[in-house]
Amino acid sequence: MRMVTTSVRLPKELLDELEKISREEGIDKGAIIRKLLTESLREYRVKKAMEMYREGKVSLWKAAEIAGITYREALEQLRLRNIPFRYDIEDLEADVRWAMK
């Protein structure tokens, strides 16, 4: 992974919290920021994909692809977020394409 440098202004309280976590974890502040940002971006992608699924804009297969997770993980996200599972013709077609591979 190619690393680049960027800067961001942070409230002092947030920076203090990052430094506290850095000390607790025994990891430098930059590594903590990268870890938290990676986790937050993953959660954002999953949340966005599940919202699109809930709104009927995408199939569960497509939501999983958008979120960067497996279909099984997407099913688990539905359960965790109390989103009803729906199975339509698009889902059936995706299942058939997958099974034919």
Image: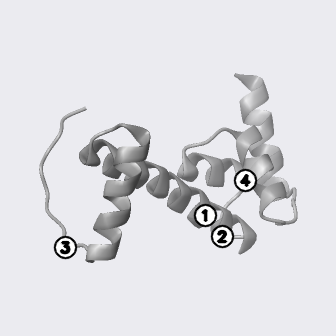
- Residue underneath mark 1: 47
Q: Tell me where residue 94 appears, x and y as whole percent.
A: 74, 43
Mark 2 to mark 3: distance in Å? Answer: 30 Å
Any mark on residue 9, and which? 3
Q: Label 2: few (<14), some or many (≥20) within 10 Å?
A: some
Whether the residues at callouts 2 and 1 have beta carbons within 8 Å, the answer is yes
SS class of the residue under badge 3?
loop
For the N terminus, the quadrant is: top left
Q: Label 4: few (<14), some or many (≥20) within 10 Å?
A: many
Mark 2 to mark 4: distance in Å? Answer: 11 Å
Looking at the image, residue 77 sits to the left or right of residue 58; the answer is right
> Disc 1 or disc 4, which is closer to the eye?
1
SS class of the residue under badge 4?
helix
Residue at 42%, 52% (x, y): give it. Answer: 36
> Disc 3 or disc 4, which is closer to the eye?
3
Looking at the image, residue 8 sits to the left or right of residue 39; the answer is left
Mark 2 to mark 1: distance in Å? Answer: 6 Å
SS class of the residue under badge 2?
helix
Answer above or below: position of 75 versus 18: above
